Image (cartoon, rainbow, N blue to C red):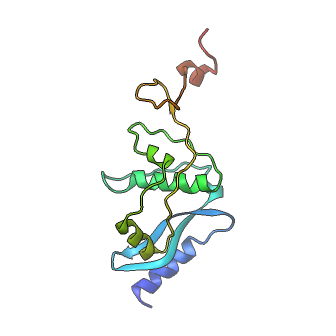
Amino acid sequence: MSNIDKFTEVIANGYTTKGDSFVLGAAMLDEQHIVKNLLVKAPLRTLNRHGLIAGATGTGKTKTIQGIAESLSNKGISVFLMDIKGDLSGIAEAGDCNPKIDERHEKVGIAWEPHYLPVEMLSLSKKGCAPSCYRQRIWTSAFFQNSRPQ
């Protein structure tokens, strides 16, 4: 059995799920060995656990979070994201097609079509907030004593 066959078998067995799931991405042994339609999936029932997405600058952390949020929203699941730098706000608008992105999606076997997602912007300060942004007030005492200041 070749390395690519072993890889395909391990990924296919490891990411077969019971019940509804969403696609995290495509499994690739390396850039030369991309197995089309070999998808890495996460079961929806596991989303009540903690997760961590970590990596160096430019490794795809933001795109991973964006992809997860888009997948969940497409399944009708509300997502709450803290976006301090504004990197994720673009999901409120449909993206543009790009030949490089189209080629990548064709290679891995994941369909992609630009579309917007329902978004509500929340802000603690209203500073730099769009007119449709809702101002949120929080009290730190509420986190510790479950009470608001008088």
Q: Residue at x 37, y 80 (%)?
A: 33
Q: Quadrant of the C terminus?
A: top right
Q: Quadrant of the N terminus?
A: bottom left
Q: Residue furthest bottom?
A: 1
Q: Residue at x 49, y 59 (%)?
A: 114
Q: Residue at x 50, y 76 (%)?
A: 38
Left or right: 116, with 48 as reference point: left
Q: Residue furthest top?
A: 150
Foreground: 49 or 65? 65
From the top left corner, tell me how far across and down residue 148 is, in percent.
61, 16
From the top left corner, tell me how far across and down residue 95 is, in percent.
44, 55
Q: Residue furthest left?
A: 57
Q: Residue at x 59, y 12 (%)?
A: 149
Give the quadrant of residue 71: bottom right
Judge whether 72 appears above or below 5 on screen. Answer: above
Foreground: 24 or 129? 129
From the top left corner, tell me how far across and down residue 43 is, in percent.
62, 61
Counting labels gives 0
Foreground: 94 or 49? 94
Foreground: 80 or 126? 126
Judge whether 72 appears above or below 10 on screen. Answer: above
From the top left corner, tell me how far across and down residue 145 is, in percent.
61, 20
Give the quadrant of residue 84: top left
